[in-house]
Image: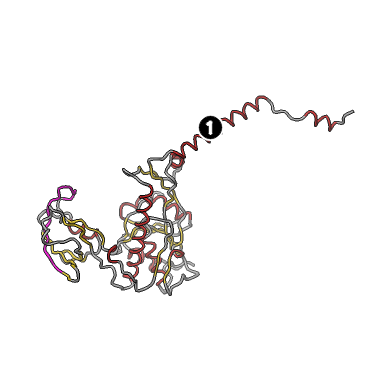
Amino acid sequence: MATTANRRWRIGFRIPPRVERIVNILSIVAIVLLLAMIALWKIPSKYLIYLPATAEAVNPHLYVAGHPSAGGRGQFLFTFVAEPDSNLLEELFARLNPDASLEPEPPSFSASQYQQQNVQLMLSSEQTAELVALCHLGYNLCDTGVVIEQVASFSKDTKVLKAGDVIVGVNGTKVATTEQLSSLITGRPAGTVFRITLRRGDKTLTVHAVTTRSPTAPHPAVLGVTIQQGLAQQFPSKLPIDMKINAGNIGGPSAGLMFTLGLLERLSPTDLTKGYSIAGTGTIALDGTVGAIGGIKQKVIGAEWAHANYFFAPVDGGNYTDAKKVVGHGMTLVPVRTLDDALNFLKTLPAKK
């Protein structure tokens, strides 16, 4: 005679038919969803996707000979955006994420070229940050001027200006960047005569150049020359202080301001941060101007994730206005137009207790 335990063993367990049907349906749905997700992952998106990324400390990315990182201080943080693979699955998740932003890809977009361009922009930004930090300390390294690449055939100055000339002044005003040159020339009527100071080889010359109407450019009057920032050609082979910025695999020029502040912090005998965590963003020009950047929303969020106390936001391009729309109550925004704006704020900042 079988015991009660043996009877239970022989009876076993059987799933009710209704539950079995539900399990089968759910399994089919799960498989369909998985296949759909794989298909979406394989199909490229036509959008660039930007997500927040936690801000990182500047100091580990810096090397300054004879000036190691000081302990017990606050820190500068630089911000950036995460850019996942551009496919329809990531696009779907981004559209459901209020912290994400999407921008249409530019015509003839190439992911490899985009990445390479960002790397080059970061390298240029690093060099500029090094020069600006040294110039702030009194080294005469930022007077690089603007290089003329080509003089157009429609220009009235083909006999006055030459390819390779370096423009360093206009009407007695010093010129260090392409932005400065453009601001001094544009907005004046065609036929305006400018006194141009330039370097040609080892000589410094002053010439008179006249503007003319451009057949293509939107500005009413131009000199008729193509230009580039002189930094790329004139960056010194050896700096007076051995320093290096290594941003790793992070691209783009938007960390220029924070790298400059990080270098000055290393070279300063005092604690510029006053014990606080100070994040920020913005390009840096040779004259110390802080320029607008993209992804301000994601960078503010990333700084908050890193528990920053303050955030430097460029006024240029509406960055500061846009940052105010997303910043929380635990972090204070500081508008900056120049490096001096940031440094002046740090001077007035009371030491953290």
**Position above or below: 283 against 49:** below
Q: In this orientation, which residue lies closer to the viewer: 153 or 2?
A: 153
Q: Is residue 210 magenta?
A: yes
Please state the extent of the stretch shown in magenta in the rendering.
205-219
Q: Quadrant of the N terminus?
A: top right
How far across and down, in percent of the image, does residue 188 sit? Answer: 14, 55
Q: In this orientation, which residue lies closer to the viewer: 318 or 55?
A: 55
Label the magenta part by its dominant secondary structure: loop
How far across and down, in percent of the image, does residue 62 sit? Answer: 43, 66
Q: Estimate how packed mark 1 is, as few (under 14), some (14 to 19) or many (20 or more) residues with alpha carbons within 10 Å.
A: few
Position of residue 41 in the picture relative to residue 317 (left or right): right
Q: In this orientation, which residue lies closer to the viewer: 154 or 307?
A: 154
Q: Quadrant of residue 166?
A: bottom left
**Position above or below: 268 against 85:** below
Regarding residue 83, the answer to whether it shows in the image is yes
**Position above or below: 288 against 296:** below
Task: Identify residue type, mark 1.
Answer: Val
How far across and down, in percent of the image, does residue 6 sit? Answer: 84, 31
Q: Residue at x 43, y 59 (%)?
A: 248
Regarding residue 189, the answer to whether it shows in the image is no
Q: Quadrant of residue 171?
A: bottom left
- Looking at this rendering, what residue extends furthest in the top direction? 17
Position of residue 259 in the picture relative to residue 193 (left or right): right
How far across and down, in percent of the image, does residue 125 sit? Answer: 34, 60
Q: Tell me the SS state at disc 1.
A: helix
Q: Is residue 314 magenta?
A: no
Image label count: 1
Q: Which residue is mark 1?
A: 32
